[in-house]
Image (spheres, helix red, strand yellow):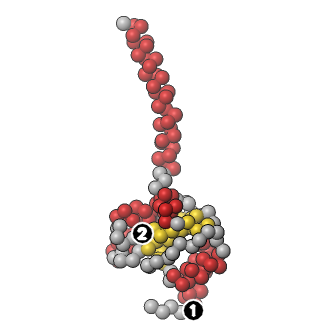
């Protein structure tokens, strides 16, 4: 579908803003994804505070070249969308959850992380990092385990002396 010059300029301006302001952007290939699944994806991402933008690859490549980012741009094959959020990991995690659900139709092809292009493997590894709350719980557990062991040992010593 052909779009007008004004629409291209509007989309390019939005892409430039997203690339300039967001700490991480995920390139998503959504070829073959049904309309119902796309609507479900957009709704879930929106509820998580993640933006989702579809643009023509020619416009996206032009904007990316002008941005002069470090690294090598990943191959943008298929139908490409951008997922982004204020949190560096949110976009990757949101898309990764749907990638597991729609394996054949949705995939992460790369992205931008901290001002440089990132390949699929880096973006996927970022998506699998546990949430902040989970990491806090793991740290608390690591701190608590030796203390708990000490308390149990002291309790057993005290019980053995009482008997």
Q: Examine the rendering and report whether any part of residue 90 can be seen.
A: no
Q: Examine the rendering and report whether any part of residue 72 can be seen.
A: yes
**SS at mark 1?**
helix
Q: Residues within 10 Å of mark 2 (few under 14, many from 20)?
A: many
Percent of width and height locating residue 48: 46, 62
6 versus 91 height, above or below: below
- Which residue is depicted at the point 51% across and 40% down? 139
Q: Earlier in the sequence, mark 2 or mark 1?
A: 1
Percent of width and height locating residue 14: 58, 78
Q: Are marks 2 and 1 in contact (CB under 8 Å)?
A: no
Residue picked out by circle 2: 107
Give the numbered dot on residue 117. none
**Eye-nearest disc, 2 or 1:** 2
Percent of width and height locating residue 85: 54, 65
Percent of width and height locating residue 20: 63, 71
Give the numbered dot on residue 5. 1
- Which residue is depicted at the point 56% across and 83% down? 59
| Nearer to us in this view, 134 or 109 | 109
Looking at the image, residue 102 sits to the left or right of residue 84; the answer is left
145 versus 27 height, above or below: above
- State which quarter of the image contains the N terminus: bottom left
- State which quarter of the image contains the C terminus: top left
Looking at the image, residue 99 sits to the left or right of residue 54; the answer is left
Question: Could you give the CA–CA distance between mark 2 and mark 1, rounded to whole angstroms?
Answer: 30 Å
Q: Residues within 10 Å of mark 1 (few under 14, many from 20)?
A: few
């Amino acid at each position: 579908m052909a779009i007008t010059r004004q629409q291209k300029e509007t989309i390019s301006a939005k892409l430039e803003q997203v690339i300039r302001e967001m700490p991480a952007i995920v390139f998503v290939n959504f070829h073959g994804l049904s309309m119902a699944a796309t609507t479900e994806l957009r709704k879930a991402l929106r509820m998580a505070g993640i933006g989702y933008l579809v643009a023509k690859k020619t416009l996206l490549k032009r904007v990316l070249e002008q941005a002069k980012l470090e690294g090598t741009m990943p191959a943008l094959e298929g139908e490409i969308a951008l997922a982004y959020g204020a949190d560096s990991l949110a976009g990757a995690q949101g898309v990764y959850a749907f990638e597991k659900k729609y394996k054949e139709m949705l995939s992460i092809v790369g992205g931008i992380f901290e001002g440089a292009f990132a390949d699929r493997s880096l973006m996927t590894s970022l998506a699998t990092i546990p949430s902040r709350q989970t990491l806090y719980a793991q740290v608390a557990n690591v701190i608590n385990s030796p203390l708990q062991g000490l308390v149990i040992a002291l309790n057993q010593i005290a019980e053995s002396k009482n008997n």
